[in-house]
Image (cartoon, grey):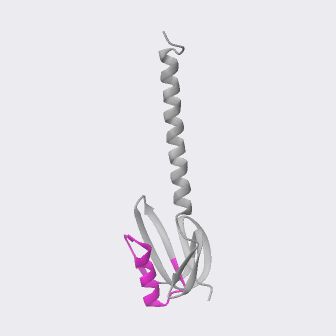
């Protein structure tokens, strides 16, 4: 018979599995929170990130089922936009709104706004 009982080994294994799961979840959340760059450039114009914020203003275009931020940047460039709202609708489902002007800001979970200040 070894130093550990079978029940101790199973308990230890279970605790390690739970701890590993918690660590993976925390790392995933951290990566999700820092995955957006602080500044995006559209035609050499800087757009600054306002995470967990929805810019409010004149929506002139919307793109559903966004696959890449470049889709939103291209739409912004075509319309000479002031801001771009990004919304996470599901785990892998996003949409963006192109704004001609910004009149205010609203805190919003699952949202981010890139805004040009000039």
Residue 47 percent across, percent down from the top left: 57, 80
Q: Residue furthest front?
A: 2
Which residue shows up at 50% across the image and 46% down it? 24
Q: Is residue 53 above or below residue 18?
A: below
How many marks overall?
0
Q: Is residue 79 above or below residue 23?
A: below
Residue 53 percent across, percent down from the top left: 58, 70
Name the quarter where the C terminus is drawn. Answer: bottom right
Which residue shows up at 49% across the image and 17% down it? 7
- Front residue of 21/83: it is 21
In the rendered structure, which segment of residues is drawn in magenta?
A: 60-84
Q: Residue furthest top?
A: 1
Q: Is residue 79 magenta?
A: yes
Q: Is residue 28 magenta?
A: no
Residue 107 percent across, percent down from the top left: 61, 67
Residue 71 percent across, percent down from the top left: 40, 78
Q: Is residue 22 above or below residue 90?
A: above
Which residue shows up at 54% across the image and 44% down it? 23
- Front residue of 70/111: it is 70
């Amino acid at each position: 018979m070894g130093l550990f009982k079978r029940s101790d080994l199973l308990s230890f294994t279970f605790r390690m599995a739970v701890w590993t799961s918690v660590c993976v979840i925390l790392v995933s959340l951290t990566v999700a929170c820092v995955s957006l760059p602080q500044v995006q450039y559209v035609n050499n114009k800087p757009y600054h990130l306002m995470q967990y914020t929805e810019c409010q203003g004149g929506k002139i275009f919307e793109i559903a089922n966004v696959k890449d931020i470049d889709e939103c940047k291209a739409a912004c460039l075509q319309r000479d936009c002031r801001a771009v709202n990004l919304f996470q609708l599901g785990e892998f489902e996003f949409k963006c709104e192109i704004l001609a002007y910004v009149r205010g800001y609203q805190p919003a979970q699952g949202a981010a706004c890139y805004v040009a200040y000039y």
